Image (cartoon, helix red, strand yellow):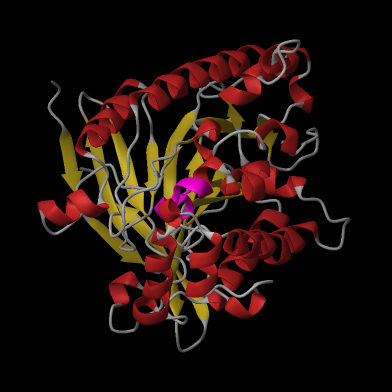
Amino acid sequence: MHKFIIRKNFNSTLTNHTTNTGGGIFLHHLSDLHIWQPEKFHQPITVYSLFRNSSFQDWKQIQGYLNIKHNRGPNLYQYSCLKKALQEIGVRCKNDEYSHLVITGDVTNISHPEEFELARNMLNEYFVETIRNGEEFNENLLYEYCSIIPGNHDAYTPSSVTNNYFGHYFGNTLGLYNAMLTSDPQQDPLSAFSQNAHHSNFFLDQRGKNQHLNSLKNSIFESLSMNDLFPNVKILSNAQDGTHVLILSLSSSVPQKPFVAGGVVEQTQLEQASKLMKEIETTFRHEYLKENNDKEVSSNASSLFKVVLMHHPPVERAKDSFREYLNGLEKKSKQRIVEFCDSEKIDLLLHGHTHVPYLGRIGISNHETLVIDNGSTTYVNEEKPYKMARYHSYHIKGKNLVGIEQHVWNTATQVFERKELVLDKV
C-alpha cells in the first residue's frame, strides 16, 4: 500500500496584478452552476409532475426539488453570474487568446431534461454567440472551446444515467472516448487520424486556422449510457510556442440514495484512461509534430501538460468522517486517483462539488499534482464571502502553470473582479 502525500492549504497570496497574456493556453474553470430558471422551462416542474412521470427509483428528484424550493432557494445560484462569466470567457476566446472553457460538473440540480436543455441553451446563447461574432452559428464551437463533465447532480437518478441526458445535451463537448474506437469496426479513428492529423476532432489548434472540427454524431452515443462516455481525452495546442495541453475527463458521478452525494471512480475507468492517453500521446508525437521536421522544435514541443477534470475532490474536505462518507469521494477511489495522477504524471487536477475554493497537492513519489477546487460560479451569499460566485483562469505555457486568476463576483457592481493568485513554492 502506497503512503499518500497530501499537502493542503499551502501558502498563497493575492495580488492585484493580472496574468501575463503572452503565449501559451488559458483554461477557464467554472463549476457547480446549479441552473434553475422555472420561467424558462417548457413544462413546469412540480412535485406532482415528478411523482407522476418518474419511476420509484427516480423519486430522489422530489427530495432535490424540495431542497431547491425550501433550502437553496431560487436566488442562491444566480443566472446573472453564469451569463456574465460565459460572456467574459467568450470574449477571451474570440480575441484569439488560445482559451478553453472547462466546467467540472453540477450543471443541473435534479438531472431533469428541462435543466439540461436550459444549460445548453445558455452555453449557445452567451458563450457560442459571443465567440462567433456575427458569423454563422455553429455548435461545433462548443467542441473546440469547451469541455464539460457531469457532477452528482447531473447523475441524480438511475434513469438520467441510462438515458444519457448528459450525452444528449453535451455530447458535442466530449473528447475521444472508448466507445468511439469500437463504434465502427471498419474504421479505427486513431488510424484515420494518423492519415490526416489536421482534420481530426481530437487535436485542436485554438485559433482554428488549420483545423476542421466536427461535433460528435448523436448516433454514436444515443444508445450509450452516460458512463460509456468516460474517460475521454482532448488535446489543445498552441503550435506557435509549443504549448500542448491534454485534458482527461473522468466521471466520479453515480446515482446515490437520498441525502447521499458521494462519488466513485472505478479502477476500470482509470485503466481505460491510461490506455487512451498512451494511444493519443503516441499518435500526437508521431503525427501532429510532423510539420516541424524542417523546423527547429523547442525541447518542450512534444511535451504535454496533463490536466484531469473530475467532480469530486480527491482529498478529504468534509468537517468529519460521516459527512465525508455522505458527500465525498469513496476512500478507495481517492487512493486510485492519487496513484493514477502519480503514475501518469498529471500536472493539474480541477474539480468542484464542495462550493468552497481550495488549493492543495497530492502525490506519492517525487511527482506532485496541483489540485484546485473552483467553488461555485453562481453561488451568491454575502454572509459567506469565502464561497462567493467565482471562476478561475489558468495560464499554461510549455510544461508550466505560469499564472492563476481569480474572478470573484461583486454583488454591488454586478461584475467579476479579477485578481491573480500567486502560488508560493512548497
| Vertical arrangement, residue 390 with respect to residue 181, above or below | below
Quadrant where the C terminus lies? top left
Magenta highlight on residue 156:
yes
Q: In this view, does 228 lie to the left or right of 6?
A: right
- x and y percent of residue 232 in the render? 54, 31
| Vertical arrangement, residue 249 with respect to residue 322, above or below | above
**In this picture, which residue range is highlighted in magenta?**
149-159
Q: Which residue is rendered at x = 39% and y = 25% of the image?
A: 270
Whether residue 10 is visible to the viewer of this picture, yes or no, is no
Q: Which residue is rendered at x = 36% and y = 81% of the image?
A: 70
Magenta highlight on residue 318:
no
Q: Which residue is rendered at x = 41% and y = 64% of the image?
A: 376
Q: Which residue is rendered at x = 52% and y = 20% of the image?
A: 276
Residue lying at the far right of the rendered structure? 136
- x and y percent of residue 416 in the render? 50, 74
Q: In this view, does 63 lie to the left or right of 142?
A: left
- x and y percent of residue 413 in the render? 50, 87
Q: Nearer the viewer, residue 167 or 281?
A: 167
Q: Which of 241 and 179 is in front in this view?
A: 179
Whether residue 51 is visible to the viewer of this picture, yes or no, is yes
- x and y percent of residue 99 in the render? 61, 49
Q: Is residue 219 left or right of residue 58?
A: right
Quadrant where the N terminus lies? top left
Q: Is residue 185 left or right of residue 149?
A: right
